[in-house]
Amino acid sequence: MKLATTTGDFRLSIDKKPECIALFKGTGFRHLDLNLYKAIYPDSPFLDDRWDRWVGEVAESAAANGMSFCQAHSPYGNQFSTGEEYEVFLMATIRSIETCGRLGIPQTVVHGRDIGGYPSREYRDLNLQRNLDFFSCLFPAMEKTGVRVLIENSCDRHAPTRENSRHYLSTAAEVVEMVEYVNHPLIGACWDTGHANVQGVDQYRSIVELGGHLKGLHINDNYGDMDSHVAPFQGTTNMDSIMQGLQDSHYGGYFTFEAGNILRDGGVWPNYRREWEFRGEKVTRLMNVPLEIKQQAIALLYQLGKHMLTEYGCFEE
């Protein structure tokens, strides 16, 4: 397996994505997951006529810095919304697929959605159909570009309603059910190890259950209490169970990190750094991590990944 990580590691705004790519030079990583998670935020070049030039700048930066893209993460939004909110989200998701096509990125993660009310059979069926209605809108772009869309596992802590603490797509069985219900050759699964640790599922059995549907990974850790996105060995996730599951399921994709909180800036969800005032003024000199130190942390992340893959005899440069 080859190592990859998300461009979200450095948490720069979407318009600074070309500069962000350059920051990975010298960290060991040569393969990246293009993070478009916040591409629909206000003033994003992704939403207007700057998009074409932006894609070109991303391609130029990747080439200049010796980077390639193995997958992407499409914008996050609510596919069950209505009106303008829905139209903007759908447009941005289709545009993310077209971006992958232009940049030669073979696949992108698109979150499924839970309407709430699960686990009743009625709401489960409605969840499946509403998700299918949305994903089917992506089929033309997927077929035109050849880009695969991956549905990611979630966890109950992301449940949409407080009245019901379950979140559909939080187990491998539910992800398989959704992938097979959508039933398109360009639909697959992405396994997020951090979500799985919060959910408390057996990672080995889950990965084996996904089988051939598994096409991508989000490797990260936490203490099982919230979706912290820290590095392996910074939490309670058993990494042996993951590695053995990948080997026994004959996974052939990239080992892609989504662990940007290996060093956390102050204003990052879900653990915000406490603010402090001194003599009536807010003090923020040590609120965020300098980029050059964060680069060293990402280089350490690469070494952690190399160690994990080497121990299981599957590391590739």
Image (cartoon, rainbow, N blue to C red):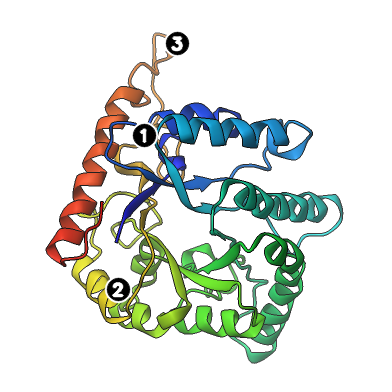
The disc placed on residue 169 is none
Q: Quadrant of the rendered structure where residue 120 is?
A: bottom right
Report which residue position mark 2 lands on. 246
Disc 2 element: helix
Q: Position of residue 171 (x, y in %)?
A: 45, 78
Q: Quadrant of the rendered structure where residue 191 is?
A: bottom left
Q: Residues within 10 Å of mark 3 (few under 14, many from 20)?
A: few
Q: Nearer the viewer, mark 3 or mark 2?
A: 2
Q: Quadrant of the N terminus?
A: bottom left
Residue drawn where x is 56% and y is 51% of the image: 104
Task: Tell me if residue 169 comes above or below residue 109 in the rendering.
Answer: below
Amino acid tagged 2: Leu
Q: Residues within 10 Å of mark 2 (few under 14, many from 20)?
A: many
Amino acid tagged 1: Phe
The answer to which of marks 3 and 2 sits earlier in the sequence is: 2
Report which residue position mark 3 lands on. 280
Q: CA distance from mark 1 to mark 3?
A: 39 Å
The disc placed on residue 24 is 1
Q: Position of residue 222 (x, y in %)?
A: 31, 56
Q: How many marks?
A: 3
Foreground residue, 145 or 227?
A: 145
Residue drawn where x is 63% and y is 53% of the image: 101
